[in-house]
Image (spheres, rainbow, N blue to C red):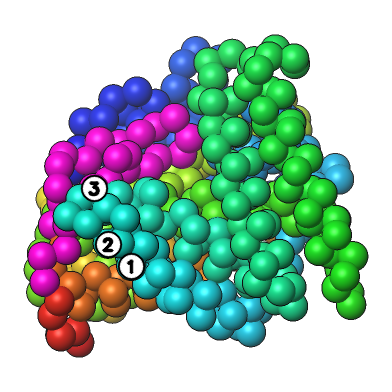
């Protein structure tokens, strides 16, 4: 697998930034929080750091881009009951996706970024709308995937595409198709709670990111066949080295000082869980091995997993964190009971967060779970 350290682009700029105060990535910004304290300040002090207004030109949150704070929804955390429901769906759909691949593409490698799509989309839809029927849920899940796919080229574009360009129209049409089915589905629920637009945002954020995280998890495990690994440790190590939402942004509402660095009003400030996950004081073990995939480092209970904020922090921290962790842990358990290996080199796609694409692997044998 390609290493994030040598990936270049925006990733390279963030990883090679000076580590003192808030680092200016270019004259006049953007700035980068380089310590946990600075990152917490940016994400929790919403009076000084606001969401960047419409950076991508859409209402998409899947690339860490939200609306401005005024009017921005606060999503309630996914409840334990919703997690159970989502996980039951995930397990069933993951097994079904593997079977379907074996039936239609027997002998070909699996592509994690493809294989995880429906299981994750359906799991998140089941969790978010526990009382809708499976038929409607499956339509919702497919429309979420279509919308995410349509958003991809807009987020990846260097300049915002024109309003009536083809890719904008496709994004618009797929979003409306999703909102239509959500409108009917939510109207049939006893207490809908959220608007179709809010639900669409929740579903999209809760689908695209876990697909990338799950694919990274399988890539790391296939690349490091180590035998007895605690699945939860494997998940944390994946979210440390390759957090899919590796960069999130805020805009200063007035002149502020961050880590001693003055930042003017309107300045763009980044927080990077990927950078924080490489700070020696947040990670147990030898400081020279920080970029190594080593799930066992978490056996040493001296550091708190997740301190590098892979799910964000503050009022806009991830409401689906428990579901995301549960899905990834089940996937790691599945991987622990199989011998998996990479079928080809995995590159890191930086066009929307980070994702391993393509991420092809083979299953050579089943084995009894070691733990
Ligand atoms: C491994 C899985 C996941 C990871 C790593 C992850 C990561 C994140 C991060 C870092 C943020 C904060 C972004 C920011 O501050 O700008 C976030 C926000 C969000 N996530 Fe997740 N997420 C995951 C799974 C989920 C799931 C399963 C759901 C839905 C059930 C979800 C729904 C959301 C929503 C709606 C937001 C926006 C919250 C707001 O702006 O108030 N995420 N996520």
Q: Is mark 1 within 8 Å of ligand 1?
A: no
46 relative to 30 in the view: left or right: right
- Ligand 1 positioned in quadrant: bottom right
Residue visible at 40% across and 69% down?
Answer: 96
To which residue does mark 1 refer? 99
Decide if residue 32 is in sight here.
Answer: yes
C-alpha span from label 3 to label 1: 16 Å
Q: Nearer the viewer, mark 3 or mark 1?
A: 1
Q: Is residue 360 magenta?
A: yes
Secondary structure of the residue carrying numbered label 2: helix
To which residue does mark 2 refer? 102
The picture places residue 319, in percent across and down from the top left corner, at: 63, 64
Secondary structure of the residue carrying numbered label 1: helix
To which residue does mark 3 refer? 360
| Residue situated in front as seen by the camera: 73 or 41 | 73
Secondary structure of the residue carrying numbered label 3: strand
Which region of the structure is painted magenta? 341-365
Residue visible at 33% across and 67% down?
Answer: 99
């Amino acid at each position: 697998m390609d290493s994030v350290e040598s990936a270049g682009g925006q990733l390279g700029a963030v990883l090679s930034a000076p580590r003192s105060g808030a680092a200016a990535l270019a004259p006049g910004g953007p700035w980068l929080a380089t310590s946990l304290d600075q990152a917490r300040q940016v994400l929790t002090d919403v009076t000084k750091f606001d969401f960047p207004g419409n950076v991508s030109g859409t209402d998409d949150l899947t690339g860490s881009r939200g609306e401005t704070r005024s009017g921005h929804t606060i999503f309630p955390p996914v409840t334990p009951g919703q997690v159970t429901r989502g996980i039951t769906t995930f397990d069933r759909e993951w097994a079904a996706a593997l079977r379907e691949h074996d039936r239609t593409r027997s002998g070909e490698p699996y592509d994690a970024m493809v294989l995880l799509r429906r299981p994750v989309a359906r799991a998140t839809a089941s969790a978010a709308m526990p009382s809708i029927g499976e038929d409607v849920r499956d339509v919702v899940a497919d429309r979420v995937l279509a919308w995410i796919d349509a958003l991809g080229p807009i987020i990846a574009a260097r300049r915002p595409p024109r309003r009536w360009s083809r890719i904008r129209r496709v994004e618009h049409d797929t979003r409306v198709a999703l909102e239509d089915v959500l409108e009917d589905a939510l109207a049939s629920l006893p207490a809908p709670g959220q608007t179709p637009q809010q639900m669409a945002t929740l579903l999209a954020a809760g689908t695209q990111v876990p697909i990338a995280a799950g694919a990274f998890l399988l890539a790391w495990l296939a690349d490091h066949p180590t035998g007895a690994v605690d699945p939860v440790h494997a998940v944390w190590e994946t979210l440390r080295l390759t957090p899919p939402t590796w960069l999130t942004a805020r805009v200063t509402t007035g002149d502020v000082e961050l880590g001693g660095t003055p930042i003017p009003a309107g300045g763009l400030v980044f927080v990077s869980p990927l950078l924080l996950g490489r700070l020696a004081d947040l990670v147990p073990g030898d400081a020279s091995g920080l970029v190594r995939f080593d799930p066992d480092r978490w056996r040493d209970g001296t550091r708190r997993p997740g301190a590098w904020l892979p799910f964000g922090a503050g009022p806009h921290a991830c409401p689906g964190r428990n579901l995301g962790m549960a899905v990834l842990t089940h996937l790691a358990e599945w991987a622990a009971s199989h011998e998996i290996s990479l079928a080809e080199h995995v590159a890191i796609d930086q066009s929307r967060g980070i994702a391993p694409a393509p991420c092809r692997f083979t299953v050579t044998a089943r084995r009894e779970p070691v733990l």
